[in-house]
Amino acid sequence: MSERLLFLTGHLALPRLERMIASFGEAAQEWRIHDIGVKVAALMTQEIIHRRLPRPVQADRVILPGRCRANLAVLTEDFGVAFERGPEEIADLPAYLGRGGAAPDLSRYDMQIFAEIVDASKMSVADISVKARELAAGGADVIDLGCLPDTPFDHLEDTIAALKVHGLKVSVDSANVAELERAAKAGVDHLLSLDEETLSILPDNSPIIPILTPRPHGDLDSLQRAARRARARGISAILDPILDPIHFGLAASIARYVELRAREPEAEIMMGTGNLTELTDADSAGVTAAMLGICSELDIRHLLTVQVSPHTRRTLQEHDAARRLMFAARADRALPKGYSDALLQIHDRKPYAATPEEIAALARELRDANFRIDVTQDGVHIYAKGFHHVAADAMALFPHLAVEHDGAHAFYLGAELMKAEIAYKLGKRYRQDEPLDFGVATDVNEEDATRFKEMGHTMRKAGEGPAKDASDS
């Protein structure tokens, strides 16, 4: 017997929800819909549900609209059946229900991120501490202090001590053996980078974990010799065959990672992705996803990141999102698809929540003058009672709006329609009165899903005064 699901909705969304549920065929034979008696599903409240939902509830789960502000735990206890908040858009229900109604678990990962502060030797201890805490908040597990040639790092020991006070793991990245020796004595966690010769600066059974590199560059035999020496001396080590930039050996360096894993099936391995993200004029999210996919296949569990160039300002957050995505997909033995939109910064997988025909049908049913704005594959729609226009260019809609004498309303509609035009041209999901979702490219303020937001800026047509939020799903 299929699971019994009960969907709560409002008048306007009911026809679309009925069509969507019908599309599931036999799988939905035990699914039911209840119109709670409000026009707009988002305006459904906890009190309305208490008053209007008949008891006992004949369902295993009750699915609320994503914009419904209600306390799920209280409803679950009162009705004796599980309440959960579904997606905001009906168009997203198939994906939501396809996973049994449970969101993918993105809390797990097995890759450790080293975030390098490339010019630490030029910064004060206080400034490094502030930067390090920012990196840790963005997902860094280890703060890597980058040393510069011919730039003394006199405050290296003080910096390591200050970061340790904040509970941070620290690595030091230097080509100067003397600086690495100082870092080791100061109690650093990792050293970047040692080779089969410079490994001698560490004593036997040292708790410091070095990152070992080939010498000369690309020589896996020398890297393996270094690894064997470390093991013989009771030193745990991470091996890094070095990722090279495009046109300077990228393909060969990826092949080295594959070969190293074949030679050293149990070894811990590092990949420094900065030679791609920093040295390629491309949005770094896709580059990061591809490289961490390789890391996931090869069980590479240590990542060295840098974010110096303006176009890589969110590389750390992208690595954090990608490691979670890859872990979840690998655990399911699945493609890294359908788990998270965090790396879909420019385009969305499902940019349109409704079709032009559905918007037209909704516009015909409206009985109020509130402007509603939507985006479908044919352009930007703005509609209200007896009013419906669509265009690819937001400015083309202005002559129809009759707001030339209402500055506040014109400002709101201009901002909202331009946002809708951007969404239309990029292929992103548009939600009226909500910011566009650029994944981890921007910070997102977490909201309390049990409380209504402040009233939106949607207004009636000129001269008709303010209106309530015009959301309709």
Image: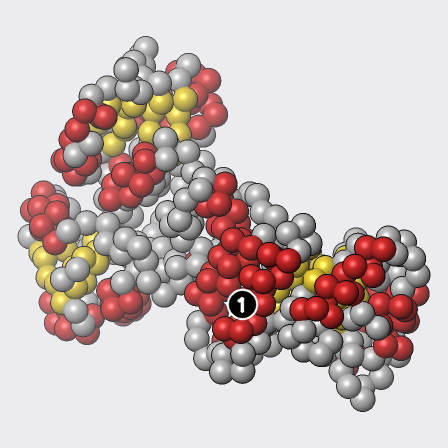
- The residue type indicated by label 1 comes to Ala
Q: Nearer the viewer, residue 8 or 199?
A: 199
Residue in the image at 72% along x and 63% along y:
224
* Residue 63 versus residue 404 in the image, above or below: above
What residue is pinned by disc 1?
Answer: 255
Q: Where's residue 39, x and y in %?
A: 20, 36
Residue in the image at 46% along x and 18% along y:
77
Q: Quadrant of residue 223?
A: bottom right
Left or right: 390 with respect to 276?
left
Residue in the image at 42% along x and 50% along y:
336
Q: Nearer the viewer, residue 449 or 149?
A: 149
Q: Quadrant of residue 381?
A: bottom left
Q: Where's residue 321, x and y in %?
A: 51, 55
Q: Where's residue 417, x and y in %?
A: 25, 65
Left or right: 184 with respect to 251?
right
Position of the N terminus by quadrant: top left
- Secondary structure under tag 1 reads helix
Q: Nearer the viewer, residue 383 or 217?
A: 217
Residue in the image at 40% along x and 30% along y:
84
